[in-house]
Image (tube, grey):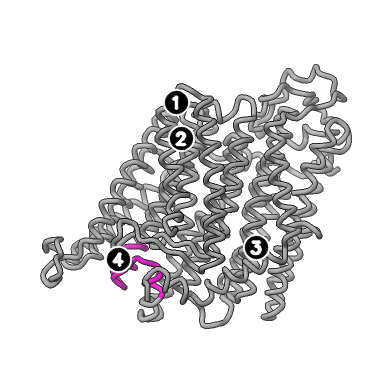
Amino acid sequence: MRSLVTLPVALPLLAAALSMVLHRRPQAQRALSVSVLVACLALTVAVLVQVNDQGPVAIQVGAWPAPIGISLVADMFAALMLVVSALVVLAVLVYSIGSPRTADDRLFFHPVYLILAAGVSASFLAGDLFNLFVAFEVMLSASYVLITLGGGRDQVRTGMTYVVISLVASTFFVTAVGLIYAATGTVNMADLAGRIGELPQPVRHGLGLLLLVVFGVKAAIFPLFFWLPDSYPTAPTPVTAIFAGLLTKVGVYAIIRTQTLMFPTDGGPSTVLLVLAGLTMVVGVLGAIAQNDIKRLLSFHIVSQIGYMIMGVGLFSVAGLAGSILFMVHQIIVKTTMFLVGGLIENATGTGALSRLGGLLHRTPLLAVLFMVPALSLAGVPPSSGFVGKLALVNAGVEIERYGIVAVSLAVSLLTLFSMTKIWAAAFWGQPGEGGPGAGGPGAAGTGTVLGSGAGGTATVAAAGRISLPPMMTVPTVVLIVASLAVAVAGAPLYDMAVDAATVLADPAPYIEAVLGR
Amino acid sequence: MIVVLALVVGTLYAVGTYLLLQRNLTQIVIGLAMMGHGANLVLLMAGGRAGRAPISGGETAGFADPLPQALALTAIVIAFGVSAFLLTLAYRSWLLRHDDEVEDDLEDRRIARSRPDPEDVR
């Protein structure tokens, strides 16, 4: 049953084509997308079980032998990411269908969304650098369409930044692939793992750095993050949520995959990566504290949290990598949840600007709970899933005596908590802001960043009125929160799986054997 | 031949980078296209010496490596599609604003301008 591995890529692509045909029948499109993504979730779980039993699974597409043909490889790391991404993609789709007057109504939202899902799966499974590039492009092309959906003035302005930055990174990626092929004669990552060691040290460092820049742009690490907080917040909430949850993590995935497989340090931690990780954390969280809009604040937090994942890679030990993987699993779920809750707040009040919000606690206690759980998790307060991830990372850091980065990560956790209390205090406590957001009609959710948007004309409804949440939006949010709690509860077994994954990353012999068959 | 190609690649990257740094969407799009061409040439050069037939049937001596050509073809197709999208976006931007200059981010400018306001500290 090795061909199971191809299905998370093939199925959404086929469904996307079918969905394109059905573009005049939105109900059929919705049913198709939901059922396909449910199938994908089941499939990825099956892949995870298979990998857990047998070790890394590889399939050669078109039956060309390994270094020439296209390999799709699922090891423990890829399988874990596949399951989590399938869960998040499905939850956000249901949320999108449930939210009034947003992305889902647009023509071709469903096909593009399915292509995005296929691209993400393909990125996790790609066994060679060039197909990693192709998978990235499939994913990014879909994301370009999603981020400019509607074609309003703001979307075009920010979409342009996003597209241009991504294209520059892609061009560098092609260059890197060309240079690596010229130097080694292969693009297959398992094959490269052996051959790249034969290159002179400076060439290896150059290639490693080039790939780090390429994936660093996608992952939004310091100093390559500046495009992210500008482009994400203007997109519709479900789109921002899926981008925040998944796209940057695919970049992190690629960093971990290439750095461990192709450019392993000689046992010790990588100081460059650790410094980058620390700066990413600090700059991201300080940026977040300065923001006034919920989506922008959360966007800066994406940057900050990426630092933790890079920290685990920088430590370069099995414990550090396992910490990174666990943190990624937690972060994909929690980050998406935060944006979904941010969307619920915007939907209920018509604005995402903190200065205009207030008093939500009395009007909708459920929303307060929905916000609080992932917020505490993001800050890493025990016993949340964030605590489990950070504990693993801090342990790994202490183990190899890198106290500097450990101290930075703990301080950034406190600042994260502070910025969460900023949202909490502004949105949930006190009286509604002087703008009088009122219970603005559902769907009034604007970007909230431009003065006067959203709040205008809706202030007539009594500010003290209760807000009811749309069930189709609330249920997926609750499901993701439950999933994040499950990560915390199942912390130990999940950590064991992460250690399994990290062991293969640290010593890729089983991975190479699965791909090359020797 | 390879030196000439290397020079061409360098020039394409240099010109592309210069155009990319302009505040004009048209120039940015052209700059990106140039860098894309440069990258494709790098892929092509990775295949070995110029002027050889890209066919390999067991006997590899005297033939160019076909794999980079396949890669370059794929990269060209992708670059083509994305460029088309970028041009559409630039056209849309022109329709909306009758101007193709790249704008600053509004929220960034607002935060840069704002001073600590006692109202905000609560």
Q: Which span of residues is magenta-colored?
A: A176-193
Element at badge 2? helix
> Do dots 3 and 2 share one subunit?
yes
Q: Identify the residue position indicated by label 3 in the image.
A: A326
Neighbours of disc 2 within 10 Å: few (<14), some (14-19), many (20+): many
Neighbours of disc 4 within 10 Å: few (<14), some (14-19), many (20+): some
Q: Mark 3 belongs to which amino acid?
A: Leu
> Do dots 4 and 1 share one subunit?
yes
Q: Identify the residue position indicated by label 2 in the image.
A: A111
Residue at image point 50% right, 38% down? A113
Q: How far across and how far down the image is residue A9, in percent?
A: 44, 49
Residue at image point 52% right, 57% down? A47
Q: Nearer the viewer, mark 4 or mark 3?
A: 4
Q: How far across and how far down the image is residue A370, in percent?
A: 77, 42
Q: Mark 1 belongs to which amino acid?
A: His
Neighbours of disc 3 within 10 Å: few (<14), some (14-19), many (20+): many
Q: How far across and how far down the image is residue A507, in percent?
A: 51, 77
Instruction: From this view, report whether residue A107 is shown above or below residue A163.
Output: above
The reply to whether the C-beta atoms of the residues labelled 1 and 2 are less than 8 Å apart is yes
- Compare residues B99 and A103 and report the one nearer the observer: A103
- Residue that extends furthest to the front in the rendered view of this protein: A1
Q: Identify the residue position indicated by label 1 in the image.
A: A23
**The magenta stretch spans residue A89:** no
How far apart in space, not on screen, are marks 4 and 1 (Cα)?
39 Å
Placement of the C terminus of chain A among the 4 image quadrants: bottom left
How far apart in space, not on screen, are marks 1 and 2 (Cα)?
9 Å
- The chain under label 2 reads A
